[in-house]
Image (spheres, helix red, strand yellow):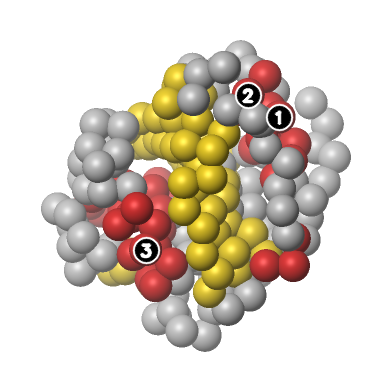
Amino acid sequence: MTQRRQQTTRKPQNNRPGGFVRIISGQWRGRKLPVHDVEGLRPTTDRVKETLFNWLAQDIYQSKCLDLFAGSGGLSFEALSRGAESVTMLELDKKAANQLEQNLKTVGATNATVVNGDSLAFLSQPGSAHDLIFIDPPFRKDLIQDVITALENNGWLAPHAMIYIEAEKELGNLTTPSHWHLHREKTAGQVCYRLFAREEP
């Protein structure tokens, strides 16, 4: 599949410790993992991450997770630390993907996979059902709607999957399938983040 839009990784925010992502809770609570200095890298802030994982408190353990724009790996490592069964991380930038691999070795995680490649190309393949999806793409790249369509059409979602979407506030409402129900929604600064609960159609 030809990549139709250039993905970039996430941009640093000033309220984050430079060069590290911190695991908030679970078996690796308090650990700081290095983040490769990639242009455009934008890790989810600790404030947003803590809120999200409070929302997901009953859904993380033994879940099968898919992190489509992994970047720093903050969401993936938080899920692993809290008992996710497995995590697949998609990251387009080679250096960032290599750092994710190194960080997995550092914490000794054997139940996670890093895929260095384009998320839409990956999702165009027939998929396996995942319980939890993280969608936190580069801002203003018009990727989210295509990701939603591919997830539904190609079998990537478990019947009662939870789908997290983090996007720029000005994006406004998203067009989601009728069997996706908005479970939680908040805004922090310029970021709007939403958690959807899927019911099998």
- Quarter of the C terminus within the rendering: top right
Give how far across and how far down residue 160 sits, in percent.
42, 26
Q: Tag 2's secondary structure?
A: helix
Q: Which residue is mark 3?
A: 51
Label 1–label 3 contact, CB within 8 A: no
Give how far across and how far down residue 18 sits, in percent.
44, 80
Give how far across and how far down residue 72 sits, in percent.
47, 59
Of residues 5 and 159, the one nearer the viewer is 159
Q: Which residue is mark 2?
A: 152
The local crowd at label 1, few if under 14, some if 14 to 19, many if 20 or more residues have their Cα within 10 Å, is some
Task: Say the numbered circle drawn on residue 149.
Answer: 1
Q: Residue at x 37, y 63 (%)?
A: 51
Residue lying furthest left = 27
Q: Is residue 102 above or below residue 61?
A: below
The amino acid sitting under disc 1 is: Thr
Q: Residue at x 44, y 30 (%)?
A: 161
